């Protein structure tokens, strides 16, 4: 007892608490997010991304919307296996934690609260993103703490972890992107992957291809904006339905009149869908997240109708190839579009026509943008 008292008299307050059992060694670990930077999908007036890494539990980041939002911590160094999220207003319903570069879901769950400790298999990620897939109102995230080794930060430890070394459990919904609520009647129902299929070459579709809500990938592709990557699917004619597009390659290429039904892009890579040859296309019940540039690309004359789509996060929803005039006619109906940086439609063609009808938007600055003049841009 005398020795113990002498130790307490010469040690630091934290070491003293360790000796007395008031905190454990995990809590003494360094928060890797301190000194890091942050970015996100949107921020409300007076809010700031950097609030989640400032060490102040009283300040917070708040997005403009309640769902389909993202906050990221970047500039991390070393491996991590635990994140602690501190939410002030208990607004979040469903969330995903993602390695931003690889787009791998690390963990997912429901509810955050004042001290949510989320464990996952160790990963060396320079940027970790928290996706708010649904919330009752705009969430207020005070801090995101990142820990390596044994974790740290304390708090409620729950949420389903994704596997970091099982290819069948990434990029499609098995380990975290399933059951994401979207408004009733819109979006894809393929929220939970039924398995993973990897093609060595682009799959050509003539007739009907029913993917059974499996995740489809292509070997050799990455998830960058590098041009010329292989498409996963090439639809020459017919119907492509019930697929999850994994984060490799260039998504879906359209080479003729087609129908696209019930398709889910958890993370868009180069583009979600590209028109390569003149076509009439109907696209229904799709869900897509995080197209860093554009979601749809038109490289040929096209007449396209999109219905019951849920798209969250894009530079543009549609881009007609810069400086080209094919033209295109593109209509979006009965859908929801969130967090678009530039515009829903961008075109430099004075013969192209664009319209939206019964489309709910949030975080969208303008419907149409052009350096020249499009033929028409209607909101109904």
Image (tube, rainbow, N blue to C red):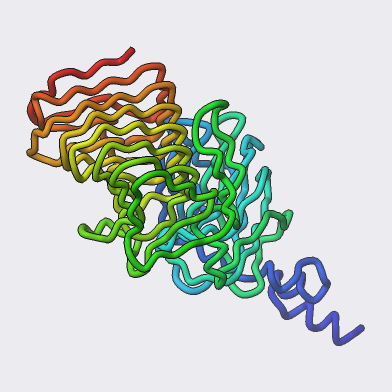
Quarter assignment of residue 55: bottom right
Q: Nearer the viewer, residue 84 or 212?
A: 212
**In this image, 211 relative to 343: left or right?**
right
Position of the N terminus by quadrant: bottom right
**In this image, 21 relative to 255: left or right?**
right
**In this image, 62 relative to 339: left or right?**
right
In percent of the image, x 42 and y 60: which residue is there?
A: 217
In percent of the image, x 26 and y 60: which residue is there?
A: 229
Q: Nearer the viewer, residue 36 or 179?
A: 179
* Residue 379 % position (x, y): 30, 15
Position of the C terminus by quadrant: top left
In percent of the image, x 7 and y 28: which residue is there?
A: 372
* Residue 319 % position (x, y): 22, 38
- Residue 341 in view here: no
Q: Nearer the viewer, residue 348 or 298?
A: 298
- Residue 50 in view here: yes
81 over 270 or under it: above or below: below
160 over 347 or under it: above or below: below
* Residue 291 % position (x, y): 35, 46
Q: Nearer the viewer, residue 80 or 47?
A: 80
Q: Residue furthest front?
A: 207
In percent of the image, x 76 and y 73: which residue is there?
A: 18
* Residue 298 % position (x, y): 21, 39
């Amino acid at each position: 007892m005398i020795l113990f008292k002498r130790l307490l008299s010469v040690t630091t307050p934290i070491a003293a608490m360790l000796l007395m059992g008031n905190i454990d060694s995990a809590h003494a670990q360094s928060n890797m997010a301190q000194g890091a930077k942050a970015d996100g999908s949107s921020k409300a007036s007076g809010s700031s991304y950097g609030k989640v890494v400032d060490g102040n539990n009283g300040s917070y980041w708040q997005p403009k919307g309640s769902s389909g939002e993202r906050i990221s911590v970047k500039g991390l160094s070393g491996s991590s296996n635990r994140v602690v999220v501190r939410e002030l207003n208990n607004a979040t319903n469903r969330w995903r934690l993602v390695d931003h570069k690889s787009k791998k879901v690390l963990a997912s769950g429901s509810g955050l609260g004042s001290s949510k400790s989320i464990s996952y298999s160790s990963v060396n990620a320079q940027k970790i993103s928290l996706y708010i897939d649904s919330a009752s109102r705009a969430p207020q995230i005070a801090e995101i703490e990142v820990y390596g080794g044994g974790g740290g930060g304390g708090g409620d430890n729950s949420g389903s972890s994704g596997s970091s070394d099982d290819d069948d459990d990434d990029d499609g919904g098995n380990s975290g992107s399933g059951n994401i609520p979207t408004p009733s009647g819109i979006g894809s129902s393929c929220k939970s992957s039924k398995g993973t299929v990897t093609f060595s070459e682009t799959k050509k579709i003539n007739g009907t291809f029913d993917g059974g809500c499996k995740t489809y990938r292509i070997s050799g592709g990455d998830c960058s904006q590098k041009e010329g990557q292989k498409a996963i699917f090439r639809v020459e004619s017919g119907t492509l339905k019930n697929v999850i597009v994994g984060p490799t390659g260039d998504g879906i290429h359209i080479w003729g009149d087609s129908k696209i039904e019930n398709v889910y892009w958890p993370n868009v890579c180069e583009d979600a869908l590209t028109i390569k040859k003149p076509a009439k296309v109907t696209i229904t019940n799709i869900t897509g997240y995080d197209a860093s540039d554009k979601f749809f690309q038109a490289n040929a004359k096209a007449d396209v109708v999109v219905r019951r789509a849920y798209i969250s996060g894009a530079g543009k929803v549609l881009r007609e190839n810069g400086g080209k005039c094919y033209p295109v006619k593109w209509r979006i109906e009965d859908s929801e579009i969130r967090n678009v940086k530039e515009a829903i439609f961008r075109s430099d063609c004075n013969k192209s026509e664009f319209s939206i009808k019964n489309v709910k938007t949030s975080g969208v600055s303008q419907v149409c943008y052009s350096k020249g003049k499009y033929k028409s841009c209607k909101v109904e």
